[in-house]
Amino acid sequence: MSLGDAMGSVWRAQPGNAATGPAVPGCRVMAVGSALPQIVVSNAEVEHFLDTSDEWISSRTGIRERRVASPEETLLQLAARAARAALAAAGVEAAEVDTVICSSSSPDETFPSLACRLQADLGCPHGPAFDVQAACSGAIYGLALAQALIHTGLSRRVLVVAAEIFSRLVDWSDRSTAVLFGDGAGAFLVGGPDAGGSELLAIDLGADGRGALALGTLPFQATSQPTDRPGYTASPRALGRVVTMNGREVFRFSTKILEQVVARLAEAVGSSPDQLTMVVPHQANSRILATAAGRLELPLERFAGNLERLGNTSSASIPLALAEAAEQGRCQSGDLICLVAFGAGLTWGGLLLRWGSTAIGIDDPVGLEARSQKHLGRALNEAGTGEEERG
Ligand SMILES: CC(C)(COP(=O)(O)OP(=O)(O)OC[C@H]1O[C@@H](n2cnc3c(N)ncnc32)[C@H](O)[C@@H]1OP(=O)(O)O)[C@@H](O)C(=O)NCCC(=O)NCCS
């Protein structure tokens, strides 16, 4: 069995009947919030200090620009902005949030957790606060935990916040990884079945540790760099480490797992992939998305995307993409929306939502232009699927 062929754990909400027993309703995603730093770094800018080109980056990845945090900006600030955007959109006070779960692969300290820092920053009461480490799948792992905590009665209102400053986790001298990532944060506010919002219908969660070495971090070996590089390239590295990756292996795993999770989630609720209104995939690479869409026989327009403008924002990418798609009016009541993530570990996580009255809050100082699927579609057309190269 190769990487990407493994089965994880699948859970689904039960309507409840004589055969299945009492109903087990899914909890509700009451709000989605997102926050972005202000600095926009285009491929053309990266060309100035790295041996790369806009043509190489956009044709291999679909990425044209990314956001990066200024040296003064902290992960906590970014996380708090996304959390506040979600709370404000839902009209819920921080005092009502009894559990805080955070995900970050780019923390600047091992402990205390980002979640504890965020709980204090927001002024939430003193229920559980902890971080999950599932790399780019972290927001989905967090949502699955929120469902479990609410289901057992331990929590009533859970904030799941994914925040990443990958510009401090890449070696800006390494063109093979530095160009891929960006910074940002996203937040989900989750309540019980009685709360308003989108119902969580099914979860698919798993990991295959045999692929642990395909995507990880190494100690950062600082080399002397020209002093005219932008300030963000010189921020201290998160935990003194930087990303290392076997790009081709990760590519193969990602395309397989994306396809399988979408198919399994649709099947879990008695549907097929073509009955999904929208797939919100982890934004890693446009060719991964195009390959998976092709294998699922889904039109690419059904995939939400922000890769072209934000790059890979790791665990923040799904709430960022979902908030943006919903703000653009792409999520209508009753729609079946599939969120699917994959990343280091190797991990994956998928969720199926029946869209309801989920509130959306976006904190982006640069301003959201009217963005249509054409952006992603154009990048994908230019990139091609690359499937033939990779098998
Ligand atoms: C990273 C990725 C885009 C690289 O594409 P690839 O076609 O596999 O490219 P390779 O790594 O084989 O490199 C091909 C060449 O491009 C070069 N190259 C790598 N990065 C480059 C850059 N930024 N600019 C210019 N050239 C670059 C390499 O040095 C290599 O040159 P060589 O042939 O002279 O040795 C691709 O493997 C990928 O998308 N993988 C998945 C990554 C991902 O999504 N990770 C996150 C998952 S959560």
Image (cartoon, rainbow, N blue to C red):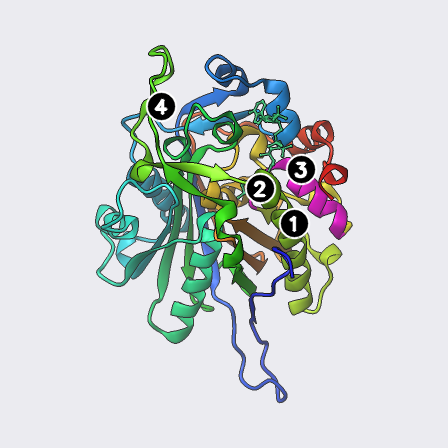
What residue is drawn where x is 65% and y is 41%?
A: 288
What residue is drawn where x is 54% and y is 27%?
A: 369
Tag in front: 3 or 2: 3
What residue is drawn where x is 42% and y is 57%?
A: 142
Q: Which residues lie in the magenta part?
A: 282-296
Q: Is 292 part of what is drawn in magenta? A: yes
Q: Which residue position is annotated with label 2?
A: 325
Earlier residue among tags 1 and 4? 4
Where residue 380 appears, x then y in whole percent?
69, 32
Tag in front: 1 or 3: 3
- The quarter in which the N terminus is drawn is bottom right
Which numbered circle lies on residue 232?
4
Earlier residue among tags 3 and 2? 3
Where residue 386 appears, x then y in whole percent?
72, 36
Q: Is mark 4 on a helix, strand or loop?
A: helix
Earlier residue among tags 1 and 3? 1
Is label 1 in contact with label 3 (beta carbons under 8 Å)? no
Q: Which residue position is annotated with label 3?
A: 287
Q: Which residue position is annotated with label 1?
A: 278
Where residue 115 appears, x then y in whole percent?
29, 52
Label 3 CB, ligand 1: below 8 Å? yes
Q: What element carries label 1?
A: strand
Q: Most prominent secondary structure in the magenta stretch?
A: helix
